[in-house]
Image (cartoon, rainbow, N blue to C red):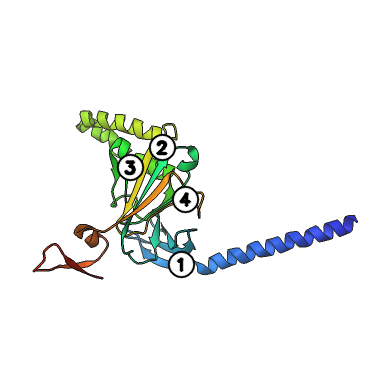
């Protein structure tokens, strides 16, 4: 009986190990490796790796990772593999708990984030193409604000003091101490996403709305625009 038990469970563990190896090999097969890629930090060369992955109840994205062989600079970015959507999307999450802080966020290169209670915005030009969490987004914003704060304190102590007070408030949000607050993700391209923890059901704290892009937002999304001479408020979009 002992022999049978050991023999049976050995086969189970071998089968599981084989399955895991197969899954790992499948993932490795999907990774595109580009050697001698240009480093934007030092103009040296490094290795770029791209892995396509599917986000549940969203769509497929490509996770890109780069490491420079010369200066050690690393960078990770999420590239959406979809085209620009017909309308922009605005996702409004009321963050009420630590669970909400851990919800996954995909912020495309065209998306911005607002925290209305703090009158604070993370523009599309920062944290571009990231896959993180609510907490991760806020902590990165804090790190960015802290840059050059000591130098700023010497040159403009009044502004530095105001920024210290603001960062103290933002830290309360990032640390999950102050609830509730509103986290608004707005993307003219329609390719950003906040995880719905009860999908496919609706999450009572997450509201989605769609909007038509402005002229400037169409340019941001990469459209070439030609303004109509007869009706100046209308334009034709071309990729």
Q: Residues within 10 Å of mark 2 (few under 14, many from 20)?
A: many
Which is in the foreground here, disc 2 or disc 4?
A: 4
Please give the residue where the numbered disc 1 appears in the rendered image.
33
As drawn, the label of residue 218 is none
Which is in the foreground here, disc 2 or disc 1?
A: 2
The answer to which of 201 and 69 lies nearer the viewer is 201
Name above or below for residue 122 compared with residue 40.
above
Please give the residue where the numbered disc 3 appears in the rendered image.
144
As drawn, the label of residue 202 is 4
Name above or below for residue 22 compared with residue 97.
below
Which is in the foreground here, disc 1 or disc 3?
A: 3
Of the image marks 4 and 1, the number of the one nearer the N terminus: 1
Q: Are marks 4 and 1 in contact (CB under 8 Å)?
A: no
Q: Residues within 10 Å of mark 4 (few under 14, many from 20)?
A: few
Q: Are marks 4 and 3 in contact (CB under 8 Å)?
A: no
Of the image marks 3 and 2, the number of the one nearer the N terminus: 3
Q: Is residue 143 visible?
A: no
Q: Is residue 34 visible?
A: yes
């Amino acid at each position: 009986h002992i022999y049978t038990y050991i023999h049976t469970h050995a086969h189970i563990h071998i089968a599981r190990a084989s399955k895991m190896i197969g899954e790992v090999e499948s993932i490795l097969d999907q990774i595109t490796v580009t050697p001698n890629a240009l480093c934007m930090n030092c103009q040296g060369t490094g290795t770029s790796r791209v892995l396509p992955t599917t986000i549940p109840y969203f769509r497929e994205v490509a996770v890109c990772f780069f490491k420079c062989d010369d200066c050690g600079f690393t960078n990770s970015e999420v590239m959406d593999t979809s085209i620009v959507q017909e309308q922009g999307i605005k996702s409004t999450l009321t963050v009420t708990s630590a669970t909400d802080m851990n919800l996954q966020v995909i912020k495309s290169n065209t998306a911005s984030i607002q925290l209305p209670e703090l009158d604070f915005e993370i523009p599309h030009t920062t944290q571009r193409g990231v896959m993180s969490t609510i907490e991760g987004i806020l902590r990165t914003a804090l790190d960015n604000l802290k840059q050059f704060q000591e130098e700023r304190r010497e040159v403009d102590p009044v502004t530095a003091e105001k920024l210290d007070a603001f960062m103290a408030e933002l830290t309360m949000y990032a640390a999950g101490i102050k609830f509730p607050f509103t986290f608004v993700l707005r993307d003219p391209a329609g390719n950003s996403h906040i995880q719905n923890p009860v999908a496919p059901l609706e999450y009572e704290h997450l509201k989605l709305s769609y909007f038509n892009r402005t002229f400037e937002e169409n340019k941001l999304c990469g459209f070439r625009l030609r303004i109509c001479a007869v009706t100046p408020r209308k334009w034709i979009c071309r990729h």
